């Protein structure tokens, strides 16, 4: 049985909102009553359904509250770790998909970076059509390997879920010189997408470590390990939308940052809601940098990484 998020939500809504008996749900969906019970249990385990007492809000764990208070976030969702990293990532992305769905409205302009976390979030998102929406790729992507889904492909996938237009930034993420970057941004198709990054309502981004042993840019083939070590040795800690930031979340005035084809860092900070998704202890230092620099307004993170950030 292909239990998509749409399907799980439908079963949960029938039972908890419409108050249908499990026997009637089983008949309506042509499944057994024990299967209905199993699905409802799965919905609770994955956080699709949350049972709360005294009106307590979701994601109100002590770690969540500490992250919000310490870093001035709009929200922090700390997801308990599962028995392996893949399950933890899947659960985190389920929560991120549900949160994102709650933000959707007509005429929304959504910016999207790249990476495995965003791919899983989009995959778990239910079909959620909006009117006159736009999905904009925040950073170039041509020239990398197939390790991660390309930003252009992610924009297309998200736009298909929202039945909205999408705009790809058809350029490499990193080019050889500042002059080449300026030249590419003067091209009509590239310029049209780039200008749209200046008028966003929401940005969805992954957060990567600049440690060459953990760097997403290295794994995707955008930079060599040697180049990554050079950047890392300047004090770079965090990679967000291809740009490098130090351990305090400050933009680094280094040549590598001036060769990135993507949203201007200042324009990124002007986006009202900037949602970051990142899991794993190896990313904790980079996530902390993003939090310190107020690069994001909302975070989805696993419990182990959150504890490491707060205790460091």
Image (cartoon, grey):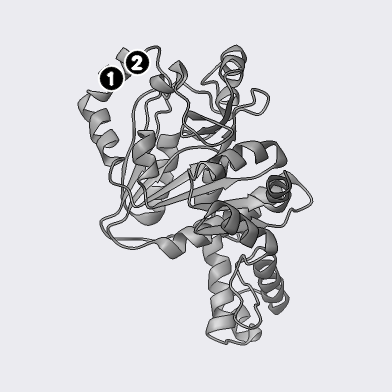
Q: Please tell me which residue is depicted at 70% across the width and 46% down the height of the picture.
A: 305
Compared to residue 145, the image places residue 224 above or below, namely above
Query: Position of 218 compared to 169: left or right?
Result: right
Compared to residue 180, the image places residue 59 above or below, namely below
Say what secondary structure mark 2 lies in: helix
Q: Please tell me which residue is depicted at 52% across the width and 57% down the height of the picture.
A: 97
**Which class describes the residues within 10 Å of circle 2: few (<14), some (14-19), or many (20+)?**
some
Q: Evaluate whether residue 147 shows in this view.
A: no
Q: Position of residue 196 (x, y in %)?
A: 27, 41
Query: Position of 195 compared to 99: left or right?
Result: left
Q: How many numbered markers are drawn?
A: 2
**Which class describes the residues within 10 Å of circle 1: few (<14), some (14-19), or many (20+)?**
few
Front-most of residues 310 and 228: 310
Marks 1 & 2, CB-CB < 8 Å contact: yes
Mark sitting on residue 118? none
Name the residue that disc number 2 marks: 178
Q: Position of residue 28 (x, y in %)?
A: 55, 79
Q: Position of residue 274 (x, y in %)?
A: 44, 49
Front-most of residues 112 and 61: 61
Name the residue that disc number 1 marks: 182
Compared to residue 3, the image places residue 16 above or below, namely below
Q: Where is the C terminus found, in terms of image quarters? A: top right
Q: Position of residue 197 (x, y in %)?
A: 31, 40
Say what secondary structure mark 1 lies in: helix
């Amino acid at each position: 049985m292909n239990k998509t998020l749409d399907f799980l939500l439908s079963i949960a809504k029938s039972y908890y909102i419409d108050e249908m008996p499990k026997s009637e749900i089983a008949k309506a969906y042509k499944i057994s009553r024990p299967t209905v019970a199993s699905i409802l249990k799965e919905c609770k385990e994955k956080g699709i359904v949350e049972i709360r007492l005294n009106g307590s809000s979701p994601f109100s764990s002590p770690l969540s509250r500490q992250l919000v208070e310490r870093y001035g976030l709009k929200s922090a969702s700390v997801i308990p770790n599962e028995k392996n990293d893949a399950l933890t990532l899947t659960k985190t992305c389920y929560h991120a998909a549900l949160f994102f769905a709650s933000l959707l409205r007509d005429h929304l302009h959504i910016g999207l970076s790249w990476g495995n976390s965003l791919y899983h979030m989009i995959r778990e998102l239910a079909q959620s059509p909006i009117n006159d929406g736009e999905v904009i790729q925040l950073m170039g992507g041509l020239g990398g390997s197939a390790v991660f889904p390309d930003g252009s492909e992610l924009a297309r996938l998200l736009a298909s879920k929202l039945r909205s237009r999408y705009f790809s930034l058809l350029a490499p993420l990193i080019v050889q010189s500042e002059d080449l970057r300026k030249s590419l941004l003067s091209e009509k198709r590239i310029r049209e997408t780039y200008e749209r990054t200046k008028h966003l309502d929401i940005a969805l981004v992954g957060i990567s470590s600049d440690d060459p042993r953990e760097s997403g840019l290295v794994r995707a083939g955008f930079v060599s390990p040697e180049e990554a070590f050079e950047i890392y040795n300047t004090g770079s800690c965090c990679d967000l939308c291809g740009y490098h930031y130090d351990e305090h979340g400050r933009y680094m005035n280094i040549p590598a940052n001036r060769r990135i084809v993507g949203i201007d860092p200042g324009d990124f900070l002007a986006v009202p809601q900037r949602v970051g998704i990142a899991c794993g202890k190896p990313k904790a230092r980079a996530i902390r940098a993003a939090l310190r620099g107020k690069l994001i307004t909302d975070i989805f993170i696993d419990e182990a990484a959150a504890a490491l950030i707060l205790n460091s």
